[in-house]
Image (cartoon, grey):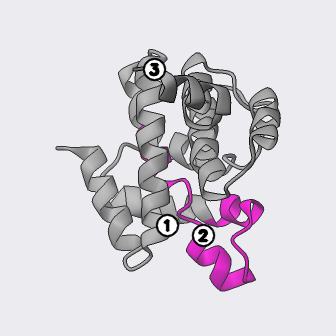
Amino acid sequence: MHLIAHVQRAMIAYFAGDVRRINHFIKVYGFAKAIGKLEGLDAGTQQVLEIAALTHDIGIKNSERLYGSASGAHQQVEGPPEAEKLLFALNVDEAVIAQVCWLIAHHHTYQDIRGLDYRILVEADFLVNIDEDSLAWPAVQTIEREIFATDTGKKFLHALFDPDAVNAEQQTP
């Protein structure tokens, strides 16, 4: 069974009609998958990371419905029960569901980040949010200092947003 593809299909159905949110979790998934592979995660941790990347914002719909807000704090509360239902219906292992739900419940908490799956999920989400929020390079530099720790995440950050790196690449014949 292609579990990740089934999770992706279920999440697209969950957010049907909300192209912006679907595109967001697909982009986070892409960065998380690549960072995890390049940082050498073991297969089990990589699977948890990829599922968490696809489902990390699943709490948005209930947050907006219940609180009129998509705040990170509300998502961290509303997300795990929704993810648990979705993943249980796909027969995902209970230990995987538990770790994915823990990551969802913490993906907007940036102090004391422990575990490479947690670190990479946060970095991947920031890579996408920086672009979606059109942040200026000085703000990106602050985020890098405060959040980014993996070599791969930093390389992606610079390749995407560092004006010096972008200008150097454009001048190469």
Q: Residues within 10 Å of mark 3 (few under 14, many from 20)?
A: few
Q: How crowded is mark 2: few (under 14 residues within 10 Å), some or many (20 or more)?
A: many
With respect to residue 72, does 43 lie above or below? above
Instruction: Name the spot of residue 36 as percent of width and height, x first.
Output: 46, 26
Residue type at tag 1:
Arg
Whichever of labels 1 and 3 marks the residue nearer the N terminus, that label is 1
Instruction: Name the spot of residue 149 as percent of width and height, x first.
Output: 69, 22
Q: How far apart are marks 3 and 2 (CA)?
A: 42 Å
Residue at the spot 81% in from the left edge and 39% down from the top edge: 138
User: Residue 27 versus residue 164: which sits nearer the camera?
Assistant: 164
Magenta stretch containing residue 51, yes or no? yes
Whichever of labels 3 and 2 marks the residue nearer the N terminus, that label is 2
Instruction: Name the spot of residue 111 as percent of width and height, x first.
Output: 82, 36
In screen coordinates, is 139 left or right of 131? right
Quarter of the image with the N terminus in it: top left
Q: Are marks 2 and 1 in contact (CB under 8 Å)?
A: yes
Q: What stretch is highlighted in magenta?
A: 50-78
- The tag on residue 60 is 2
Give the quadrant of residue 48. top left
Q: Mark 1 points at which residue?
A: 21
